[in-house]
Image (cartoon, helix red, strand yellow):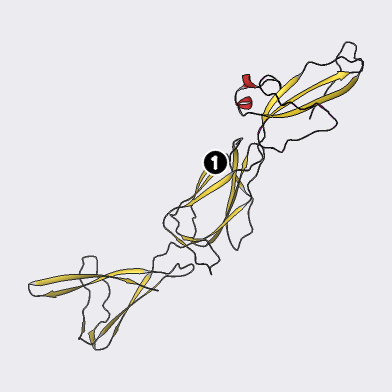
Amino acid sequence: TLTAEDPQPHPVGLNETYWRNTIVPDSYCEVPADCKPCGYTVQNCGNFNNYTWPFNKPEESCHLIEFYSTDLLGNVELLNWQCVFVDNTPPVTAKTVGTPNVPCAQNQACHYYITQQTPITLDCRDQQPHPSGVEQLFWRDYLDNETAPPFVPEYSNHLDIYKKEDSRHILEWYCEDVLGNREATQTEIDVVDSQAPVITKTIVGPQFGICPPPNENNNGNIISNCTIDGVTEIHVGVVDPQPHPVDGVTCDWYYEVIETGFESSVFVEIQFP
């Protein structure tokens, strides 16, 4: 927007205001001393236009804007000029999901299974060719059965987020630069599961005593004994508890053979579906 007035002490009145715009090398905007009227170093100067209403410049580049006014007697104002970068590109937020995490399957309406110790990092980055700088990062996190709260502004381009409740979370965010160029709102659905799996054990076949025996006590001694023979089966199962099981459980187990003067241990890993 250009505004002109005929100054005191005896103004006769404005006649016209003129302007022109020239795309110039970036150094014109980066180094103030290099910002000079068209014709000093840049020779492809266009004609001046009559100023009738505010104008804008869509091209992302360095622009040299020159302007002056005349009064009704033909007095001509000295030429004014200004060099400005045009930045119409919004920032882009880079998201990193830390460990532990498990990507959701295609048939699941989520992005990741995580725990309450999994960090989610948002880094807002203004884009080339002429970044004006990041102003704010906006975000909100809520459960999928809740009404979405207002966005929380962060006056920074970096944020670490931890989910503090085992549930299904909706994380939304966007970034905005100093000129108001805004990134589209991004969404991630995370299922938080911080509960360990629960193992079950069943003895099937000939047995005597308390079978299966309970776990060891604090001293490492068996509280009771269970006697089986060679055809007895030991069934081990596992359940990832509700409300948000990630499944895909792996259990490590071992057994020991203890005889007089001889002891050995065997370690085995089992993948549960």
Q: In the image, what residue occupies the spot 27% across and 75% down?
A: 214
Query: Label 1 sits on what residue type?
Result: Asn
Characterize the magenta stretch by its predominant secondary structure.
loop
Asked if residue 122 is among those painted magenta in the image, a careful observer would answer no
Judge from the rendering whether residue 233 lies leftward or rightward of residue 128; answer left or right: left
Q: Quadrant of the C terminus?
A: bottom left
Give coordinates of residue 239: x percent, y percent: 40, 73
Q: Position of residue 107 (x, y in %)?
A: 53, 70
Q: Where does label 1 land, which residue?
A: 157
For label 1, count other residues whose C-alpha is less than 10 Å away and answer few (under 14), some (14-19) or many (20+). many
Residue sticking out furthest to the left: 261
66 displayed left or right of 29 = right
Q: Secondary structure at mark 1?
A: loop
Kindly indicate the quadrant of the structure image that contains residue 176: top right
The single residue placed furthest to the top in the displayed view is 9
Q: Quadrant of the N terminus?
A: top right
Q: Is residue 106 above or below residue 46?
A: below
Left of 259 or right of it: where is 143?
right
Residue in view at x 46 percent, y 63 percent: 193
Viewer-proximal residue, 172 or 55? Answer: 55
Stretch of the chain drawn in magenta: 40-62
48 inside magenta stretch: yes
